[in-house]
Amino acid sequence: SFSPIAPGAALLRGFARAQAAQLLANIEDLIKHAPLRHLVTPGGYPMSVAMTNCGSFGWGSDQHGYRYTAQDPISGLAWPAMPEIFLTLATAAALAAGFPHFAPDACLINEYLPAARMSLHQDRNERHMTSPIVSVSLGLPAVFLFGGLSRSDKPQRLLLSHGDVVVWGGPSRLAFHGVAPLADGWHGLLGSRRINLTFRHAGEKL
Ligand code: MD3
Ligand code: FE
């Protein structure tokens, strides 16, 4: 069962908690092959969140814009495959929220250290807007900002904690959202960090 946040958005508190240690072991392995990095925005500023990807496609940003690519621009190699446990978790969460056909081909891995933040934005580089985005929060809690379809809509604040999963589909798919600066703290499994996984159906690059 889930709590509705907004039309099309479902919060599954603690849905990933039992698998957190296994998810983290997979993340530690993935980042050996595709290291976390601070991407530069088209405006020329490095992001405070460090990122990498797994799956057929990976999200990225540089001075020219935002796009999905099949290769990691650092290594020139394909992004690491999406671990089975990631895929199983993401599709189970989507099913629980009423999206039985979700087939993610991209997983963006975001690492927040204290003070890292993500400003309000929309996720609109994916080809398949009828697919939801599934997000998995691990480690330190964060204040998630959930706005409306217009940048000027005042965002709701929602605390996302270790193991929480949110499925964003339907009318909430194109909502503005962001993350407030991460408060300092310590988490027993992740230490002084938060890691967020977002599963997407990106398709071919736009
Ligand atoms: C609502 N990540 O990677 S996850 C992102 O916590 C991103 O790292 C945040 O926003 C994070 O793009 C938020 C929750 C989330 C992700 C995608 C959404 C919420 C969303 C897409 C549409 C609406
Ligand atoms: Fe986003």
Image: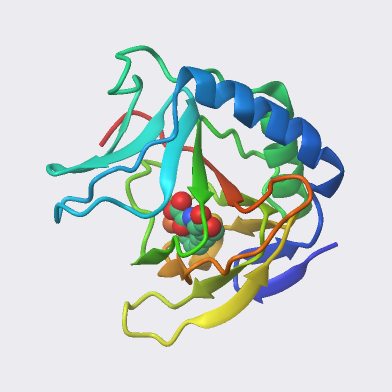
Residue 173 visible in the shown view: no
66 displayed left or right of 126: left
For the point 60% across and 53% down, the residue is 194
| Quadrant hosting residue 6 | bottom right
Location of the C terminus (image quadrant): top left
Residue found at the very far top of the displayed protein: 77
For the point 60% across and 52% down, the residue is 193
Residue 141 visible in the shown view: yes
For the point 51% across and 47% down, the residue is 111
Residue 107: percent from left, percent from top: 52, 36
| Quadrant hosting residue 205 | top left
Q: How is the image coloured?
A: rainbow
* 65 and 148: which is toward the camera: 65
Residue 7: percent from left, percent from top: 60, 73
Residue 191: percent from left, percent from top: 68, 49
Residue 29: percent from left, percent from top: 61, 21
| Quadrant hosting residue 67 | top left
* 153 and 109: which is toward the camera: 109
* 45 and 89: which is toward the camera: 45
For the point 65% across and 38% down, the residue is 101
112 displayed left or right of 5: left
Q: How many marks?
A: 0
